[in-house]
Amino acid sequence: MVLDIKIRKEVEADYSQREIILDDCFGKDRNNRTVYIYRKIPSIKELSLISYLKKEPKVVIGTIRFYRVLIEGFHCLLLGPLAVDKLYQGKGFGKKLIQKGLDLAKENGEKICFVSGEYDYYCHYGFKKLSSINLNIIVPGPISFKDLLIYEFNNDAKNYLKNNSQLLPSN
Ligand SMILES: CC(C)(COP(=O)(O)OP(=O)(O)OC[C@H]1O[C@@H](n2cnc3c(N)ncnc32)[C@H](O)[C@@H]1OP(=O)(O)O)[C@@H](O)C(=O)NCCC(=O)NCCS
């Protein structure tokens, strides 16, 4: 059966359902992970999205957020967290969230997005290993999934980023 998957902006009423999904997917101690140093500020509102089924718009099934990060003062995005209710994983909710998030980010004029995630998953959306474009970016701490991946909205990251620069939180 084809599910009628919809995407909308996150609202405050989604908070508790979203937390349950994140706890379930990443554990209650997830805030100790390095990526959370970038998540001390509010996420970018227009890129904070929820996936749901058309017939139940208030039931959160998936969530994606993006945060502002800086590389030598250049504004980039950091994707995450991205998570889908375990009961609904593998049905296309994650795919729609990433595609919509990246489309909106492009419309907003973003140039570069990073993610700390599995290459085998994110490569389907155009994320690359930094090594594939001969770029090294320093993250101040260990990251899950080993690699920081990059998405170039215009294939021109090297015009903006200097090798061995640090990925810094924006605050
Ligand atoms: C990873 C996650 C967000 C994917 O969302 P999802 O709704 O389950 O995935 P989708 O149904 O949209 O899958 C999209 C595609 O990715 C593939 N895929 C899913 N998980 C994958 C993985 N871990 N590695 C490689 N491919 C994967 C699917 O087979 C599908 O391929 P297709 O388009 O060829 O059919 C979800 O499984 C999840 O919440 N996992 C736990 C939390 C997590 O790992 N988040 C991401 C870490 S940054």
Image (spheres, rainbow, N blue to C red):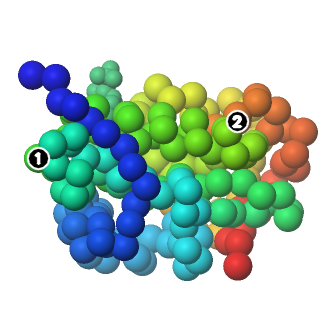
The picture places residue 38, in percent across and down from the top left corner, at 59, 70
Determine which residue is flagged by label 1. Answer: 87
Quarter of the image that includes the N terminus = top left
Question: Looking at the image, in which quadrant does ligand 1 appear?
Answer: top left
- Left-right relation of 164 to 10: right
In the rendered image, the vertical position of residue 122 relative to residue 68, given as above or below: above
Other residues around mark 2 within 10 Å, as few (<14) / some (14–19) / many (≥20): some
In the rendered image, the vertical position of residue 22 relative to residue 56, given as above or below: below
- Left-right relation of 56 to 141: left
Q: How many labels does the image show?
A: 2
Label number found at residue 152:
2
The picture places residue 112, in percent across and down from the top left corner, at 71, 44
Quarter of the image that includes the C terminus = bottom right
Of residue 87 and residue 44, the one placed in the foreground of this image is: 44
Disc 2 element: strand
Residue that sits furthest to the top in the current view: 1
- Left-right relation of 142 to 165: left
In the rendered structure, which disc, 2 or 1, sits on the residue that comes first in sequence? 1
User: Which kind of residue does numbered mark 1 sit on?
Assistant: Leu
CA separation in Å, label 2 and label 1 = 32 Å
